[in-house]
Image: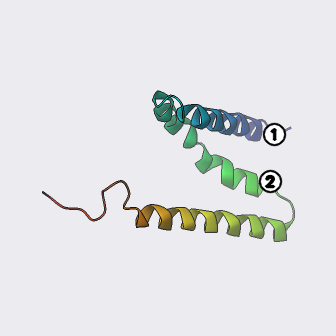
Amino acid sequence: TDKIFDFLLVIMILSLLVSVFSMYITLFNRFGYYFSIYSILFIPYAIHQIKESEIKVIYSLVIYIITFIYFIFRLTEGFHGVIPFSFY
């Protein structure tokens, strides 16, 4: 087995659990930031492990589309009041 993949998978499962608990206890939301950063390593590594190139391309496109939709959604709601920026 691949130890790096197993480690990243465990961290991602912990991130999911912390995210679920943060809905009930807001203190866990800050802990979620420490675990969610590993998704930057996990997602490309998981896609790299796929052997078939057609499926690899499809998964990559799905990740790009989901990320783009999330960005557009956050942009339209104003990033918690940051956009439009005003001094006073």
Along the line of sight, the residue nearer the viewer: 55 or 18: 18
Task: Indicate the position of residue 33 as horizontal and vertical percent values.
Answer: 50, 38
In the image: residue 41, left or right of residue 74? right
Along the line of sight, the residue nearer the viewer: 76 or 52: 76
Question: Element under label 1?
Answer: loop
Q: Is mark 1 in CB contact (under 8 Å) with mark 2?
A: yes
60 versus 29 height, above or below: below
Give the residue type that dot 2 points to.
Gln
20 versus 52 height, above or below: above
Q: Which mark is residue 2?
A: 1
Give the residue type that dot 1 points to.
Asp
Q: Residue at x 38, y 57 (%)?
A: 79
In the image: residue 27, left or right of residue 3? left
Q: Residue at x 46, y 33 (%)?
A: 30
Task: Indicate the position of residue 88 as horizontal and vertical percent values.
Answer: 12, 57
Question: Element under label 2?
Answer: loop
Q: Which mark is residue 44?
A: none
Along the line of sight, the residue nearer the viewer: 7 or 68: 68
Q: Residue at x 81, y 39 (%)?
A: 2
Q: In the rendered image, which quarter contains the N terminus?
A: top right
What residue did someone put label 2 on? 49
Task: Return the residue found at the far front.
Answer: 24
Task: Indicate the position of residue 7 as horizontal and vertical percent values.
Answer: 71, 34
Q: Residue at x 62, y 68 (%)?
A: 65
78 versus 2 height, above or below: below
34 versus 75 height, above or below: above
Q: Residues within 10 Å of mark 1 (few under 14, many from 20)?
A: few
Q: CA distance from mark 1 to mark 2?
A: 10 Å
Along the line of sight, the residue nearer the viewer: 34 or 1: 34
Q: Quadrant of residue 47?
A: bottom right
